[in-house]
Image: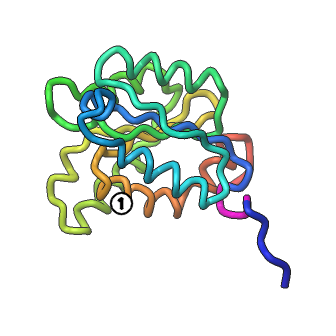
Amino acid sequence: MTDPTPDAGPLAGRSVVVVTCSTRAAAGVYPDRGGALLVETLRAWGANVPDATVVPDGPAVAEALEAALATDPDLLLTTGGTGLTPTDGTPEATRSFLTREVPGVAEAIRARGVAHGIPTAVLSRGLAGQAGRTVVVNLPGSTGGVRDALEVLAEVLPHALSQAQGGDH
């Protein structure tokens, strides 16, 4: 048996961009743990992913999404800004870029959180969909929410990315 190549994994060769939407992380009040966890996991899955872009809530989120989508990634993940606070606007910024929604992914992420004993997971307003051929998913900002989302995404991303790029069922 041969050793796997460093880029072997369910997302081998896929281009991914991660955007962390958090005013406090952007200001350096605390480190961006959610984005770092995503990047670390995605790299382990074989994806080509730079370090997360960290932006404050508000107009900077839409600007970061637009810049990310201009690079034509296979996958764009956001973390943060999906709750009910007055500044949480990641879903609204995301919706303006989506050409179609895939609500089952966001529903599954919320359900996974509830199954792990976090009833407030239902308060996440995250979206999932496509912006052209790019799959876009909003994740919660907490590391627990990111872990729950990664469990769901591990099960569906290879198939979703294949289909988004024109693959068959």
- Characterize the magenta stretch by its predominant secondary structure: loop
| Image mark count | 1
Query: Residue 66: x percent and y percent?
Result: 52, 19
Residue 97 among those drawn in magenta: no
User: Is residue 40 shown left or right of residue 20?
Assistant: right
- Span shown in magenta: 7-11
Looking at the rendering, in which quadrant would you find the N terminus?
A: bottom right
Q: Amino acid at mark 1?
A: Asp
The color scheme shown is rainbow
Residue at 31% over, 38% down: 80
Query: Residue 82: x percent and y percent?
Result: 27, 37
The image shows residue 4, relative to residue 68, as above or below, that is below
Query: Residue 123: x percent and y percent?
Result: 18, 45
Residue at 39% over, 35% down: 20
Residue at 32% over, 54% down: 143
Q: Which corner quadrant of the image does residue 22 belong to?
A: top left
Residue at 20% over, 50% down: 122
The image shows residue 59, relative to residue 33, as above or below, that is above
Q: Where does label 1 land, which residue? A: 148
